[in-house]
Image: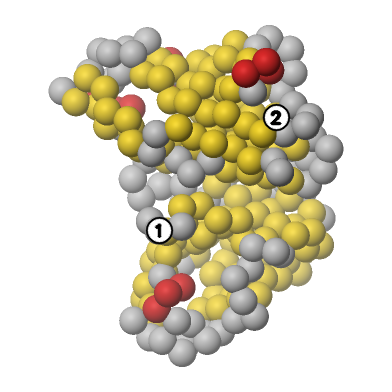
Amino acid sequence: DAGVIQSPRHEVTEMGQEVTLRCKPISGHNSLFWYRQTMMRGLELLIYFNNNVPIDDSGMPEDRFSAKMPNASFSTLKIQPSEPRDSAVYFCASSRPGPYEQYFGPGTRLTVT
Amino acid sequence: AQSVTQLGSHVSVSEGALVLLRCNYSSSVPPYLFWYVQYPNQGLQLLLKYTTGATLVKGINGFEAEFKKSETSFHLTKPSAHMSDAAEYFCAAHLITGNQFYFGTGTSLTVIP
């Protein structure tokens, strides 16, 4: 299996621009998670989906952030408009439904100037 | 409130010495417990997990952890540190009663030659 796939791996954008991060979970995994990691705040859960349905989005920092999962093999995290404080590494992870281990992608390093 | 606490954000050991990384959880119901490792510029990967059964679990790279319900702990150990063990380690708890996942703040392990 190819594991969790994220794209792009690196993104540099200017403040105010729209950013879209993409994730392909492991086939057969029905749960998908988006995390943000920074030195200051550590690893933060932003949102997670079960069977393509958002279950908990309480970690989404504000309305500028949105996430979708149109089907079982694809999810996006969008930031519009982006701000310098959004600079971080964004991870996508997937798992079987339930309290099971999560498989993380390699992350997208976002820099907003 | 449920949570995961990792004592010590930075741990340094000499090569060949014992590695001990501490993790305590707070939960009214024993959760599934995990240790993940993150190497630089990579996503988290599973080291080991405890779900049910034997309380001493073995993982990859010679690591093991023991679930102690009375102490609500799940400390990670390795008898002899190797230079390649230098990484960030995360303890995590996933509650079996619902869709709740908690990660600790991480412990950075440095191995001194």
Q: Is residue A62 above or below residue A15?
A: above
Q: Which of the numbered marks, if any, corresponds to residue A103? A: none
- Identified by mark 2, the residue type is Tyr
Mark 1 lies on residue: A40
Q: Which of the numbered marks, if any, corresponds to residue B32? A: 2
The quadrant of the picture occupied by the C terminus of chain A is bottom left
Q: Which residue is drawn at 57% across and 22% down?
A: B74
Q: How crowded is mark 1: few (under 14 residues within 10 Å), some or many (20 or more)?
A: few
Q: Residues within 10 Å of mark 2 (few under 14, many from 20)?
A: some
Q: Which of B39 and B73 is in front in this view?
A: B73
Q: Which chain carries label 2?
A: B
Between marks 2 and 1, how big is the CA–CA gap? 27 Å
**Residue, far bottom:** A16
Confirm whether residue B59 shows in the render.
no
Q: In this view, does A98 lie to the left or right of B85?
A: right
Residue B3, position as x, y percentages in the image? 64, 41
- Identified by mark 1, the residue type is Met
Q: Which chain carries label 1?
A: A
Q: SS at mark 2?
A: strand
- The part of the image, by quadrant, that contains residue B51 is top right
Residue B1, position as x, y percentages in the image? 71, 44
